[in-house]
């Protein structure tokens, strides 16, 4: 997803709304709102479980998301109970690192 809410690529059935992108961008700047009300990604509400300078994590039951911010994009990975959260994190961060290396 671009910072402007445009979709660069997505998986079938995983549609992220521009308003969700804007809420994530605000969350990268300050996690206060996410801590109190959670985050919404692809129409699902996730509990905020952590963040850093360029990542946000959310969880809903056995499922979760890891979002990583680059200069121009937000990479969002989704995992269910068949995938370890750490694997999702690693793969999302690989893509984010590549895009950062390409000045995206």
Image (cartoon, rainbow, N blue to C red):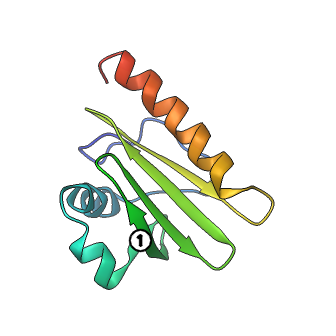
- Location of residue 69 by image quarter: top left
Residue at figure coordinates x 41%, y 45% from the top left: 68
Q: Is residue 103 left or right of residue 17?
A: left
The N terminus - image quarter = top left
- Mark 1 falls on what kind of element? strand
Within-10-Å neighbours for mark 1: few <14, some 14–19, many 20+: many
Residue at figure coordinates x 77%, y 66% from the top left: 81
| Labels in figure, total | 1
Q: Is residue 9 left or right of residue 35?
A: right
Q: Position of residue 14 (x, y in %)?
A: 57, 56
Q: Position of residue 84 (x, y in %)?
A: 72, 56
Please indicate, yes or no, whether residue 12 appears anywhere in the rendered image.
Answer: no
The residue at which mark 1 appears reads as: 40
Q: Is residue 47 above or below residue 92?
A: below
Residue at figure coordinates x 57%, y 47% from the top left: 89
Residue farthest toward the bottom in the current orientation of the protein: 36
Q: Position of residue 77 (x, y in %)?
A: 56, 50
Residue farthest toward the top in the current orientation of the protein: 102
Residue at figure coordinates x 41%, y 65% from the top left: 50
Please indicate, yes or no, whether residue 93 appears anywhere in the rendered image.
Answer: yes
The C terminus - image quarter = top left
- Location of residue 40 by image quarter: bottom left
Q: Is residue 48 above or below residue 94?
A: below
Q: Is residue 2 above or below residue 19?
A: above
């Amino acid at each position: 997803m671009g910072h402007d809410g445009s979709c660069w690529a997505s998986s079938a059935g995983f549609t992220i709304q521009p308003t969700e992108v804007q809420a994530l961008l605000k969350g990268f700047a300050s996690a206060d709102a996410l801590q109190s009300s959670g985050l919404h990604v692809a129409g699902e509400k996730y509990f905020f479980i952590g963040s850093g300078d360029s990542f946000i994590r959310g969880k809903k039951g056995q499922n979760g998301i890891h979002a990583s911010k680059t200069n121009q994009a937000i990479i969002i990975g989704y995992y269910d109970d068949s995938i370890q959260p750490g694997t999702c994190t690693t793969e999302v961060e690989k893509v984010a690192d590549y895009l950062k290396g390409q000045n995206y």
